[in-house]
Structure formats: structure tokens, C-alpha cells
Amino acid sequence: MAGALVDGAGRILVRALRATPAREDAETVMGAVASVLAELTASPLWGRVDAVGIGSAGPVDTATGTVSPVNVPAWRGFPLAERVRALVGGLPVALVGDGVAMTAAEHWRGAARGYDDALCLVVSTGVGGGLVLGGRPHPGPTGNAGHIGHISVDLDGDPCPCGGRGCVERIASGPNIARRALAAGWRPGPDGDATAAGVAVAARAGDPAARAAYERAGRALAAGIAATATLLEVRIAVVGGGVAGAGDVLFGPLRQALRQYATLSFTQRLEVVPAKTGTDAGLLGAAAAARGL
């Protein structure tokens, strides 16, 4: 869990970081949030704070201020916005999903800056996303609009934990890239790295199973991006998250496949670019949400 004090120009002035006790009970998890906030409120700069933003793993419900992160089992319908508001003296609190936070960050300070219509993706342990429409982030009624990871791109594909089948996330997330590569015969190198990062190293070295896993991930992302562009006429797709760190190993097959899927005249000029805000995306996006950007 990360927290920061961010100024109006998007500069991070103070940071706080705590491990997430994801498998503990709800109050223990909340205790980590409270510890981050305690460090921030102790800063001499805290007196200048006029709003608080939260970017949370989803699903979130911005209408009720609750969160139900898949990777934090004890938080189901947890009233995070209300609990944070009580810890910050009643300041205004804005809650968004992590995909929307990344989108707000990239539109404010990153690769989507200057674009009125954009799709931003977080490709990591899962695949999240968010939209910019008409010049503003578009979170939707509950804050989950743009969740591209659960678009089905393989009608006969593997069941997804969300209850669907053949979802983008089931193919293109880091754990699923590693799972597919291992099933096809790839084995980790001497460092024992069995993650998608290890698969990327092997793919660069020419390992066929590793390359195939990234090529399939790229095709899945391309299909989801093309479907979104067809529906909404977004002009740019910004891809961030840990898996995007694979660089051309991912972006090469993604862009190649996009030419096969985005064939209509109004989708053919769609750009796909890496995110610029990196590991600060969640913090900047939460700040942008607090500022109403």
C-alpha cells in the first residue's frame, strides 16, 4: 500500500509505503491503511491537504464508497471511503478503481495527455483498465467502466475466476502468461524466476514456448483494444503495469495483431504506447480523482 502527498502540478512531495496483509482479517488490512495515513498526516505539509483520493483494486463501488478487491478476501463491500474519511478529519474523499486511477494519471501527466478519447490498461497480476471520453476520465456509475480484462476474446477459452470464459485477463495477465509458458514446456532459468518477467527474458533469448505465451497475450490484448476502439472511437491505448515492462516482447505481437483486429477506417490509426507514469500511476491517479480531474 502506497500513499503520498501530491501537489497541483502532479509532483509527489511525501511518500509512505506499507506491505499489504492481504490474507489477514479486514481490520488488520485497514490497520495498514491507517499506518500509511498516520505517516502522511504527521508531515508538516499535511495542513495544505484539501482532499484525499483512493485508488483501489476492484471491484469498487464508488456510489457506496465500498471495495471488494479480489486479492483481499476479507474486504467484501468494505466501507473504505468512510473509514478513510474518519481518519483524515472529514476531508472530501474520492474513491476510484486502480484501472481508473492509472487512466487519470496517464491523462494528467502521462502518455494520454492531450487526448480526449483514450483507453488505458494495467497489465499485471490481472488486467484492468479505464477510459477517457470527451476529455475526462469516465469511471461509469460504479467506477468500473473500461474494465477490459473481463472482455471475452475466446468464446471457448478457459473459465475465468470472474465467472466468464476466455477473458483477456485469463490470457494476458502475468500469472497466465507464465502458466501458459510452463504448460508448453518453458522452464525458468538459473535464477528460478517463474514469473512473466522470467518468461520475457526467455522470449528475448528466443525460447519458442516463452515467445508463444507473449504472442498469445498480445493477441488477446489487441482483440480487447480493437473491440473497445470500435465501440468508443478511442484514439490511443496506453499500456502499463508490470507485464508492459517486457517491452517489444509484448508490444511487437500486440501491434501486429491489432492490425488484424482494428480494420475499420476509424480504428486503423489507433496508437498503442507504453505508459509513462510507471509505479507512481496509482498515486497520481488517486490525486487526480481527488482534484476532480
Image: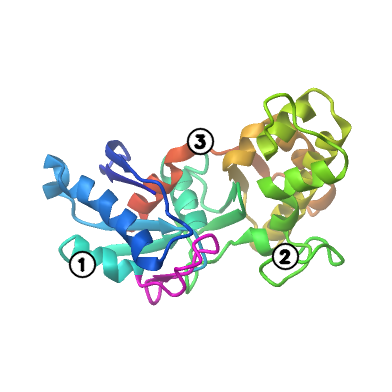
Q: Residue at x 54, y 57 (%)?
A: 130
Kind of residue at badge 3: Lys
N-terminal of the pair, mark 3 or mark 1, is 1
Q: Residue at x 60, y 62 (%)?
A: 147
Percent coordinates x, y for residue 188 in the rendering: 75, 32
Q: Nearer the viewer, residue 134 or 30?
A: 30
Count of number-bearing discs: 3
Q: On the picture, is 122 further left or further right than 150?
A: left
Kind of residue at badge 2: Cys
Percent coordinates x, y for residue 205 in the rendering: 79, 22
Q: On the picture, is 18 further left or further right than 223?
A: left
Kind of residue at badge 1: Ala
Read off the magenta span: 61-79
Q: Is residue 253 above or below residue 233?
A: above
Residue 73 painted magenta: yes
- Disc 2: which residue: 160
Query: Badges 3 and 1: C-beta atoms under 8 Å apart?
Result: no
N-terminal of the pair, mark 3 or mark 2, is 2
Q: Is residue 142 above or below residue 6?
A: below
- Disc 1: which residue: 86
Residue 112 painted magenta: no
Q: Residue at x 79, y 54 (%)?
A: 264
Q: Nearer the viewer, mark 3 or mark 1?
A: 1
Q: Residue at x 81, y 52 (%)?
A: 261
Percent coordinates x, y for residue 292 in the rendering: 33, 58
Secondary element under disc 2, as helix, strand or loop, is loop
